[in-house]
Amino acid sequence: MDLPSPNFGPRRNGLRPEFVVLHYTAMISAKAALARLCDPGPQVSAHYLICEKGRVFRLVPEEMRAWHAGAGRWRGKDDINSRSIGIELQNRGDHPYCEPQMTALETLLTGIMARWNIPPDGVIGHSDMAPGRKSDPGARFDWRRLALQGLSVWPDAGARESGPRDWPELAARFGYPMDDPDASLAAFRARFRPRYTGPADIEDIRILDRLLHRS
């Protein structure tokens, strides 16, 4: 369903989508989230919002620059708004994502990735590109499910490992900004090792190594 938001503009410097950024709304309902995303006051938006029942709302045309990512970097690149398509998922971040919503997301991602030639490793979370500042889509989001359908990445158990290395080096190679390594570690773990805390360990290194050498 089209529900145009006034909060968008042209993509800058001839940039085109090369990432998809996933968010949660952190609001009590889809209605409240839609009101905010379409309110010219806060100046925030996304290209799509998916409610818990799986209904998809298109707010900003894909070729335009929505205002969803804010400050941050991925793979050393900034102005992620100009480089991405933003998808909001109705969720407060403290409960699992429901089946109709995930099914709708998978269908939507399949089309977006085909239209813009975005590979699976171009689908990221808001927390990946803005660690410490953002936590969405959170530890309850099922990244492995997307990866099994080729819509994201997950460490391949059969991938070649190059042996123990420095976690910040591997994390930076994968894409994380390293201004605050602890924040990046927390974002990485929320995605790949929920509930783990403490300093980076050998398993964190192995996961990144497998991600970097996946088939």
Image (spheres, rainbow, N blue to C red):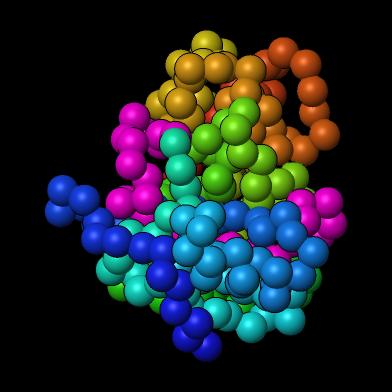
Q: Position of residue 35 (x, y in %)?
A: 62, 71
- The one nearer the camera, 19 or 67, is 67
Toward which corner of the image does residue 149 lie, by quadrant? bottom right
Left or right: 77 as drawn, with respect to 188: left
Looking at the image, is 133 positioned above or below residue 121? Answer: above
**Residue 5 is at least partly visible in this image:** yes
Q: Position of residue 125 (x, y in %)?
A: 56, 47
Which residue shows up at 74% across the image and 74% down it? 52
- Say if the magenta span includes residue 93: yes
Toward which corner of the image does residue 85 lie, by quadrant? bottom left
Q: Main secondary structure of the magenta part?
A: loop
Which residue shows up at 48% across the image and 19% down it? 178
Q: Position of residue 102 (x, y in %)?
A: 67, 71
- The one nearer the camera, 35 or 104, is 35
Which residue shows up at 41% across the image and 26% down it? 173
Report how many numbered discs are placed on residues in the image. 0
Left or right: 32 as drawn, with respect to 196: left
Looking at the image, is 145 positioned above or below residue 34? Answer: above
Residue stretch in magenta: 72-96
Q: Position of residue 134 (x, y in %)?
A: 61, 39
Q: Residue furthest front?
A: 41
